[in-house]
Image (cartoon, grey):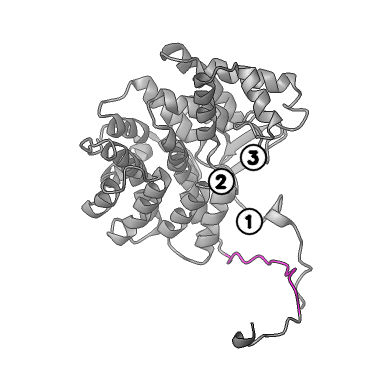
Amino acid sequence: MSDPEPVRRIGLDNVIVADTELSEIDGEKPELLYRGVDAQELAEKSSYEETAYLLWNGELPTRDELDEFRAELDERRGLSRGVAEVVEHAPEDAVPMDVLRSAVSTTQVYGEVGETPRENALSVLAKAPTALATFGRARRGEETLEPRDDLDTAANFLYMLNGEEPDERHAEILDTALLLHADHGLNASTFTSRVIASTESDVISALTGAIGALKGPLHGGANQDVMEMLLDIDESDKDVSSYVADMLENGERVPGFGHRVYKEFDPRAEVLKEIAEEVSETTEGPDWYGMLEEVEAYLREEKRIHEKGISPNVDLYSGTVYYSLGIPIDFFVPMFAVGRSAGWTAQVQEQYDNNRLVRPRAEYVGERGVEYTPIDER
């Protein structure tokens, strides 16, 4: 039996390569579901760790099941001396995503993983926030802190980064942001993790690859770009509309707008927009939320929104939320990775459960019949 005729689609746009029960994106409604549950409802009523359990196990946990899951994470949050030294001795100007990727990879070197994919997944979910917070304090020359077993993932990160127990509402806000980033279909980093898993490689390798893919500016960097744009506007003599007009005139892309799947407003952005507005009312300094409203209003007036399929995405508001929580700008993409770890690990396990080696083809378009020229004649 001959192989089926290959389908040519550069970039694999809209090509289905796997079945999944983890998340569904409906770009027309728009809607994001985790295991059939609306992500916006989870953001309102649930927590990041409860959502991670849902993604891993297919159903929401009971109180006892959630307590047991949290206890498993608490046991693994600390870093071994070997991993801690990698993080603490990283250069002050190291790219945080590089440090996070190295920390995750190094957990395997220093034996901080278990014998099963689930144990390895628990290690990544627990240790990634610790590693990032540890680097944040180390590069400022401050003493690093051990995680606390009375704080969840979001609260622990803020505590270990800033050196004080966080405001309860601030911890809730970060928890919601992590939840909204937990999974999002077969995006580039998730696909990378599943390709690696399809070779029957380990969870740590798959997650290391996923972090590397997320580092790319076409995938995970827009929230940082949004905040840098706002800071630049604040420091310039231009008003928001003039600044954005100049960007468009120069052929630049305004960060935080547009999505490959969502045709209307990104449902995650709806939640974060409300949070950004709330935070702006209680935070001193420039009105970042108001500035974003002006950016959106200008693009709408110029018919750049909806008419051209460009609408606000999750990155438009997540950056200002992180910034208001005291999280460094170059930590924004790593925070994306911390949240997405719940989905990456669930996706990898789903790949293991029904595995087939991912092996697409490329069409050769180069020359043929080229004769070899001996080296001395070249």
The picture places residue 258, in percent across and down from the top left corner, at 66, 34
The three-letter amino acid code for the residue at tag 2 is Leu
Magenta segment, prevailing SS (helix, strand or loop): loop
Can I make out residue 114 in this image? no
How many marks are shown on the rendered structure? 3
Q: Is residue 328 magenta?
A: no
Which label number is shown at residue 18?
1
Residue appearing at x 44%, y 55% in the figure: 208
CB within 8 Å, label 1 to label 2? no
The residue identified by callout 3 is 25
Viewer-nearest residue: 230 or 149? 230
The picture places residue 370, in percent across and down from the top left corner, at 73, 81
Viewer-nearest residue: 363 or 247? 247
Nearer the viewer's eye, disc 3 or disc 2? 3
Give how far apart the Cα atoms at labels 1 and 2 are: 11 Å
Which label number is shown at residue 22?
2
CB within 8 Å, label 3 to label 2? no
Which portion, as a residue range, is magenta?
356-368
The picture places residue 309, in percent across and down from the top left corner, at 74, 33
Placement of the C terminus among the 4 image quadrants: bottom right
Which label number is shown at residue 201?
none
Q: Secondary structure at mark 2?
A: loop
Q: Secondary structure at mark 1?
A: loop
Residue 365 in the image: above or below residue 203: below
Question: Closer to the N terminus: mark 1 or mark 3?
Answer: 1
Give how far apart the Cα atoms at labels 1 and 3 are: 14 Å
Q: Is residue 366 magenta?
A: yes
Residue lying at the far front in this picture: please name it: 377
The three-letter amino acid code for the residue at tag 3 is Ile
